[in-house]
Amino acid sequence: MNDEFGVEYAAVLLRDLALTEFNDLTGNQALQAGIEPRSVWLAICMAQGVPEERWLGLNKKPKDKHAE
């Protein structure tokens, strides 16, 4: 989250953004309820309009399913 939003705004989003995927829990509340961090991250990405190519994080690419 810090890479995408910066330290301060990431903290605000975790604290204040109500995530509809989790019955309007905030990211912090969802994590405390045991929801997987990746699921929380993806919900925040969708809510904030982060392009899908950045959902894996900074400078990370999806794994090639056909590579061996």
Image (cartoon, rainbow, N blue to C red):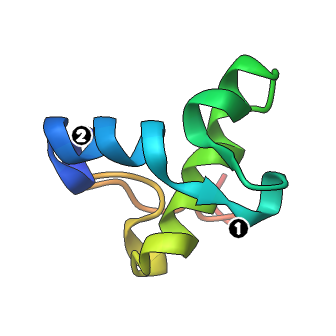
Residue type marked 2: Asn
Disc 1 target residue: 66
Q: Earlier in the sequence, mark 1 or mark 2?
A: 2
- Which one is in front, 36 or 25? 25
Tell me the quarter of the image containing the N terminus.
Answer: top left
Instruction: Say whether residue 18 is left or right of residue 25.
Output: left
Disc 2 packing (10 Å; few <14; some 14–19; many ≥20): few
Instruction: Say whether residue 19 is left or right of residue 5.
Output: right
The location of residue 11, given as percent across then percent down, is 31, 35
The residue sitting at 71% across, 18% down in the picture is 32
* CB under 8 Å between discs 1 and 2: no
Q: Secondary structure at mark 1?
A: loop
The location of residue 67, given as percent across then percent down, is 63, 60
The location of residue 46, given as percent across then percent down, is 56, 73
| 60 vs 35: above or below | below
Residue 35 visible in the current orientation: yes
Disc 2 target residue: 2
Name the image quarter holding residue 60: bottom left
Tell how many labels: 2
| 45 vs 16: above or below | below
Residue 1 visible in the current orientation: no
Name the image quarter holding residue 66: bottom right
Mark 1 and mark 2: Cα distance apart in space:
31 Å
Q: Secondary structure at mark 2?
A: helix
The residue sitting at 41% across, 61% down in the picture is 61
The residue sitting at 47% across, 63% down in the picture is 55
- Which one is in front, 17 or 51? 17
The residue sitting at 46% across, 46% down in the picture is 16
Residue type marked 1: His
- Which one is in front, 4 or 12? 12
